[in-house]
Amino acid sequence: MAKRRNNLTNDTPKVFVGLDIGTTKIATVVGYMAMDGKIEIIGHGKSDSNGVQHGLVYNLAKTIDGIKTSVEIASNQSGYPISDVFVGIAGRHIKNTEFRHRVLRKNGTEALIVQDEINEMIKTIKETPNQAGETVIDVIPQKFYVDNNFDREIIDPVGELGVNLEGVFQIITGNEHEINKILRCVEEAELNPADLILEPLASGLVSLTQEEKQAGVVLVDIGGGTTDIAIYLEGNPVYTQVIPIGGHVITSDIASVCEISDELAEKLKINHGTCVVEKSNKNNFITIPKYGQTEPIQISEEFLAKIIYARVIRDILTPVKAIIDKSGYANKIKNVVITGGGAYLKHLKELSQFTFRKPTRIGSPGLGFLSVPSELKHPMYATSLGLLKFGTMSNIDYTDDSEEVHKHSRNAVKEKDSPKENNSIKKVKLFFKSMLDNFMEKTE
């Protein structure tokens, strides 16, 4: 493919790239932040993902080929060579642990709590020894207590007075071997992983409004192999979890029950499927070819809906509801936003509202962008667009007071390392602060 001649000038800000290595697709999005604070997309590419299952890389060679294909398409379309990429991470190896940390403040009755103290608590937690083979991906503050007043939960204690400050944090870890496989695939595709970002937090950047994050919202990102959950309260992410099952399991069930190929099953799901049986037309029959038979068979929409409903309820929505209830934030969540490739399953919004008993909407990504090409407006591109947005945010200049926060959100993965050096990577950190969201809110 011939490279498109770009129309950017020498004054154009730095170009950033988001790379989403998913179970069903590998997506690359290229863009930059314009002078008005909006993100301009100048190229994108997509390829099949044949080496990933449930968010884990199994076949490195196929994954590397998929990355190269996706990046090449995006590079040709943008007219720019691609080197540094912001990479998403999820998968069944992601674990969550609650950790409490208390500090005794000097002059606590006179000096206000400042952000640097919270950052220092996070730094201490990151340096706490983890289980062998585990790498810290993120440390998310959940709530704080001042002077042992456990009846008063505080999301953001900055500006308060107190001698004793105790925080409850969520430590998100990943298997070091799995993380290194992702890094190796990116590097062998001749790219530099500028940072690793937890995928549900990346998706939240482009799918959730600041008002939703302030009031209390849960993001449910249904991918091909995983379902990622992120809960926001008072503007900040306070809880995340990953379920190792996504939309592809529905396709597999249809293929197995009907004895057809996965490709045909996917088409049936998209074109004729619904997850609400009552919404199907039991009198409408679909003619499909079947393995080993010369004559096609017929199945009703109602039969197809029953297959889809069983999987969606049992393996996706019910586990998500259990995670929300377990998080301790269920009563504070005002609404649910669903994104990812599985978000456009017919009547998923209605079934989700019934299951969660919360107002639900399908999240179309694009917050903070000047415009989004029509082919990228699908919820399946929420992660890749979010990774691009994070990249542009990491380039924002901050005052000295916020430099420490900024350091947490950039260059977690340095220059290209040898495989041996990759094995020594122990800390990959992303910490989203409300100042970043507030900045983007002002530019939206």
Image (cartoon, grey):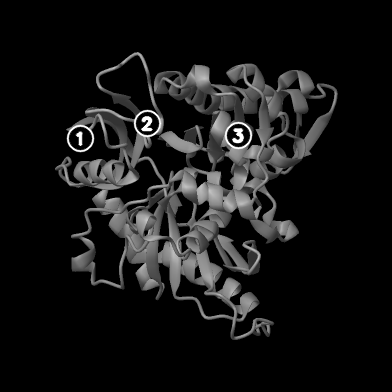
Residue that label 3 marks:
212
Camera-nearest residue between 48 and 406? 406
Where is 85 relative to 308, above or below? below
Which label lies toward us, 1 or 3?
A: 1
Which label lies toward us, 1 or 2?
A: 1
Q: Is tag 1's residue or tag 3's residue first in the polypeptide sequence?
A: 1
Q: Secondary structure at mark 2?
A: strand
Instruction: Determine crowd level at label 1: few under 14, some 14-19, many 20+ residues with C-alpha closer than 10 A.
Output: few
Give the Cα separation between the discs numbered 1 and 2.
25 Å
Check residue 90 in the rendering and tell me which mark sits there, or answer none: none
Total number of numbered discs in the rendering: 3
- Kind of residue indicated by mark 2: Gln
Looking at the image, residue 408 sits to the left or right of residue 246; the answer is left
Marks 2 and 3 in Cβ contact (< 8 Å)? no
- Kind of residue indicated by mark 1: Asn
Query: Is the N terminus in the top left, top right, bottom left or bottom right quadrant?
Result: bottom right
Looking at the image, residue 429 sits to the left or right of residue 281; the answer is left
Residue that label 1 marks:
107
Q: Secondary structure at mark 1?
A: loop
Check residue 142 in the rendering and tell me which mark sits there, or answer none: 2
Instruction: Determine crowd level at label 2: few under 14, some 14-19, many 20+ residues with C-alpha closer than 10 A.
Output: many
